[in-house]
Amino acid sequence: MELVSASLLLLLCLCCILLASAWKSQSQSQQGQLPPGPTPLPLLGNFLQLDRTNLQDKYGPVFTVHLGSRRVVVLCGYQAVKEALVDQAEEFSGRGEIPAFSKDFNGHGVVFANGERWRQLRRFSLTVLRNFGMGKRSIEERIQEEAQCLVEELRKTQGAPFDPIFNLSQAVSNIICSIVFGNRFDYKDEKFIALNKLIFKRFPGFPSVQLYNAFPGILEKIPGPHQTGSKCSQEIISFILERIKLQQATLDLNAPQNFIDCFLVKMDSIDISRMRLR
């Protein structure tokens, strides 16, 4: 019996060694011309080495680490960042995929788009935002008006203790909504309250998001906060699509009133799928 146990233990150790060797070989073959960095552990990558090793001193201002299965090139210091993001801005303008949001937004929108699509969206968005007062006195007046509405809402508490975070979130959301939808919401509006609650549920869970980004293949099959976040994203998207349908019914191609109107006019002029709004 002891002989069988010893044999199983030896076999297990051998399997672990072979797996580690295979992982190391695969990592080295995938690395190609990437900068040097510490050897990653199977599954964990370099997570256990990040806190205790001064990687910059050992590998220089540019090095590679593995966050789970994801390879990440790290730039340290002004000179390295300037050379990559300023001197070679075009070559480094691409964005890495964010697994936690990829299935929700599918590479659409200014935040999650990439390449030429992102450049076109960015150019269009900046033009529209400037036309609606971004960087001008008109947007300052809009912010001041919303600040006054926020003050009036806070006065309703009559000096009683309360948490202002949700009200502050509503104020910021209202400024964005006034540009995107063309109107603000009352602080007691049920749909507006529901929207802000969804935003609160979606974005505070960043630890789970980072974990999902490191191990997307594993966590996709496991329930947890990352799954709840995806459901919140879909509900937020549904809210926006509902607003888009309402504005399509009253759209004046010659007099767009807000960001969505401008986007719809642009889409009509180049005849692309309306689902790109996502």
Image (cartoon, helix red, strand yellow):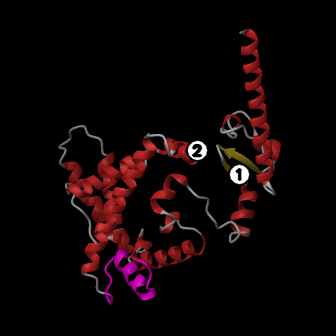
Q: Closer to the N terminus: mark 2 or mark 1?
A: 1
Q: Where residue 158 appears, x then y in whole percent?
A: 17, 43
Is residue 235 toward the left or the right of residue 190 in the image? right
Q: Which quadrant holds residue 275?
A: bottom left
Q: Closest to the observer: 213 or 3? A: 3
Residue under circle 2?
A: 215
Q: Position of residue 75 (x, y in %)?
A: 72, 53
User: What segment is highlighted magenta in the picture?
Assistant: 253-273
Q: Mark 1: few, some, or many residues within 10 Å (few <14, many ≥20)?
A: some
The residues bearing labels 2 and 1 have C-alpha atoms spaced at a distance of: 19 Å
The local crowd at label 2, few if under 14, some if 14 to 19, many if 20 or more residues have their Cα within 10 Å, is: some
Q: Position of residue 258 (x, y in %)?
A: 33, 76
Residue 56 in view, yes or no: yes
Amino acid on which disc 2 is placed: Phe
Residue occupying image coordinates x 39% and y 55%: 233
Looking at the picture, tell me which residue is in the foreground, 126 or 37. 37
Check residue 45 for magenta coloring: no
Foreground mark, 2 or 1?
2
Q: Is residue 265 magenta?
A: yes
The type of residue carrying mark 1 is Val
